[in-house]
Image (cartoon, rainbow, N blue to C red):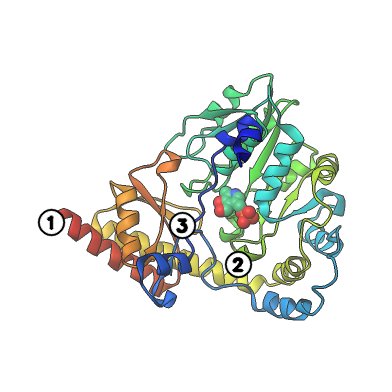
Amino acid sequence: MNLAAIAKPWVGALATYQPGKPIEEVARELGLGDPERIVKLASNENPLGPSPRALEAMRTAASRMHIYPDGDSYYLREALARRFGVSRDEVFLGHGSNEILALLGHVFLEPGVSAVMSEHAFVVYKLVTALYQGTIIETPARELGHDLDAMRAAIRPDTRVVFIANPNNPTGTMIPADALHRFIDALPEHVAAVLDEAYVELLPPRLQPDVLRYVRERRNVFVLRTFSKAHGLAGLRIGYAIAPPEGIALLNRVRQPFNVNAMAQAAALAALEDDAHIARTRALVEEGLDQVSQALAGMGIDYVPSSANFLLVKVGNGRGYFDALLRRGVIVRPVDGYGLPEYIRVSIGTRAENERFLDALALVREEWSSS
Ligand SMILES: Cc1ncc(COP(=O)(O)O)c(C=O)c1O
């Protein structure tokens, strides 16, 4: 059998996404026994879990899982449209915002076409561009964040997509609203801007940029959001795009008929109404960021101030710290694949989880400095 020999040659060259290690796998590998003893701060999940309202909706939905989902996600699109003051035909649901990124690649990217993205930006932009054999144009970061002037200058006649993560993962950096505005204003007609706002609900509303105005103005813009982070539904895989109707119609042409499952639709609909859960989550993240950043500062360890629910921490040897923390049952994320070998990324957890991380970090540091 030689399936690789008969596959399309470029597929063999594609990189596979490396997800954060699941708790069970780490427990097995390290013989740590009880998974309860392991703290996972590797995938920017919500430490409070799903909204109680979403849990109730999932319980109710469970007995109807023999029925195909609503292929149009009618009620959820309706609810999102109402909440954001857009129309239903400006809303698209996906199997996580990752699926929507891939579908955007399906719509816009092919050999001979390029996509612009920033150094240290969310890795899926590169994976998707490679998947559709587009050319990756990566612009240098400015203070680890997106340099929109450089990104604008990098746009070529063959560019079709510019990917912008705001806040960005893994750096936690945020683009100033006026810079984003200037960028969108100067966006050429032949380019679509993908504004990936996976973490935006974690910010207080006054700090959330008003990007939906670009949709109302019918710019070439796709705003991407997800139920994975602030809403605590990462396991269900559900995200959405808000864009002018013409853009949504293109996405609908390339998606599978039932790309969003019924459980996810029910939970998301309930979660969307649970403002109290978002407020609790926001408060927990804010306190956790204070707790971890103050402790790091006290230890003399540099970190990047974050607008999201994780921190990029400068430890020196990121991969080494990742391994050493893992052996102590704390899972963080190495980010050498992002061109950041000196850093680890740690998600904000509960107060107790953050303490576990900080204690383990102090121990590893002591060990390394004495060896
Ligand atoms: C910037 C960014 N965009 C998109 C996603 C994908 O989220 P989803 O779970 O909706 O696929 C993530 C997940 O980590 C992310 O960090």
Task: Specify the amino acid type for callout 3.
Answer: Phe
Vertical relation: 319 (above or below) 156: below
Label 2 secondary element: loop
Q: Label 3 to label 2, Cα distance in Å?
A: 15 Å
Task: Specify the amino acid type for callout 1.
Answer: Ser
Residue wearing tag 2: 232
Q: Label 3 to label 1, Cα distance in Å?
A: 29 Å
- Front residue of 289 and 356: 356
The answer to whether residue 314 of the structure is visible from this angle is no
**Residue 337 placement (x, y as % from top left):** 44, 42
What residue is drawn where x is 68% and y is 33%? 132
Q: Quadrant of residue 291?
A: bottom left
**Residue 194 placement (x, y as % from top left):** 67, 40
Residue wearing tag 1: 370
- Badge 3 residue CB within 8 Å of ligand 1: no
Quadrant where the C terminus is found in the figure:
bottom left
What residue is drawn where x is 61% and y is 59%? 201
What residue is drawn where x is 83% and y is 40%? 250
Label 3 secondary element: strand
Q: Label 2 to label 1, Cα distance in Å?
A: 40 Å
Task: Specify the amino acid type for callout 2.
Answer: Gly
Residue wearing tag 3: 310
**Residue 198 placement (x, y as % from top left):** 61, 53
User: In the rendered structure, are the residues bearing label 3 and label 2 in contact, judged by CB atoms less than 8 Å apart?
Assistant: no
- Front residue of 255 and 53: 255
